[in-house]
């Protein structure tokens, strides 16, 4: 989101991070992050008085895929086991936000990718639970 919306509060930080990535680095969309981008770009609670139409949001996503550094990764075959393992610490709790966080952690592990996030709670949980493939945005 921060890379897609110029006036996002983390846009400058996100672009500084992209600029220091190695030339061979790849940025990955999963189905979950694709859905999230489309959902947030069309949401007035997020975009204020300027939510995009779904067609406009798809155009932003399509522009990302034109960049040779951007790829869409399908779900790794072993994702379910990793996802269940990541959610286990919350199994006895009603904790809807953690479901998405745990899916992202399982996906990044299953895809051998590094998850970059501005979400401090996700970053803290990942570090505490030993997910070394997470870096702060």
Image: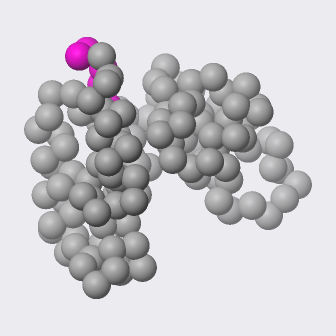
Q: Is residue 123 magenta?
A: no
Quadrant where the N terminus sits is bottom left
Q: Residue at x 59, y 34 (%)?
A: 106
Q: Residue furthest right?
A: 92
* Residue plotted at (48% across, 26% down): 114
Q: Nearer the viewer, residue 15 or 26?
A: 15
**Mostly what secondary structure, the magenta segment?**
loop
Which residue extends farthest bottom? 49
Q: Is residue 98 above or below residue 38?
A: above
Q: Is residue 71 above or below residue 60?
A: above
- In screen coordinates, is 22 left or right of 67? right
Q: Is residue 83 visible?
A: no
Picture coordinates of residue 32, whole percent (x, y)? 44, 49
Q: Residue 126 vs residue 53: left or right?
A: right
Query: Can residue 3 be seen in this snapshot?
Result: yes
Query: x%, y% of residue 103?
Result: 58, 43
For the point 21% across and 63% down, the residue is 57
How has the structure been colored for display? one colour
Is residue 124 positioned above or below 98 on the image? above
- On screen, residue 110 versus residue 44, left or right, reads right
Q: Position of residue 56 (x, y in %)?
A: 15, 67
Q: Residue at x 34, y 61 (%)?
A: 8
Q: Position of residue 105 (x, y in %)?
A: 59, 36
Marks counted in the figure total 0
Q: As drawn, is 42 to the left or to the right of 9?
A: left
Magenta highlight range: 23-27
């Amino acid at each position: 989101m921060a890379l897609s919306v110029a006036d996002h509060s983390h846009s400058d930080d996100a672009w500084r991070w992209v600029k220091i990535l190695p030339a061979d680095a790849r940025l990955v969309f999963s189905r979950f992050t694709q859905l999230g981008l489309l959902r947030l770009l069309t949401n007035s609670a997020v975009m204020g008085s300027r939510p995009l139409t779904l067609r406009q949001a798809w155009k932003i996503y399509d522009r990302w895929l034109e960049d040779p550094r951007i790829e869409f990764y399908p779900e790794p075959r072993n994702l379910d086991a990793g996802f269940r393992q990541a959610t286990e610490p919350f199994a006895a709790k009603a904790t809807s936000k953690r479901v998405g966080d745990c899916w992202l952690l399982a996906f990044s592990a299953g895809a051998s990718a590094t998850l970059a996030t501005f979400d401090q709670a996700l970053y803290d949980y990942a570090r505490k639970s030993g997910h070394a493939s997470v870096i702060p945005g």
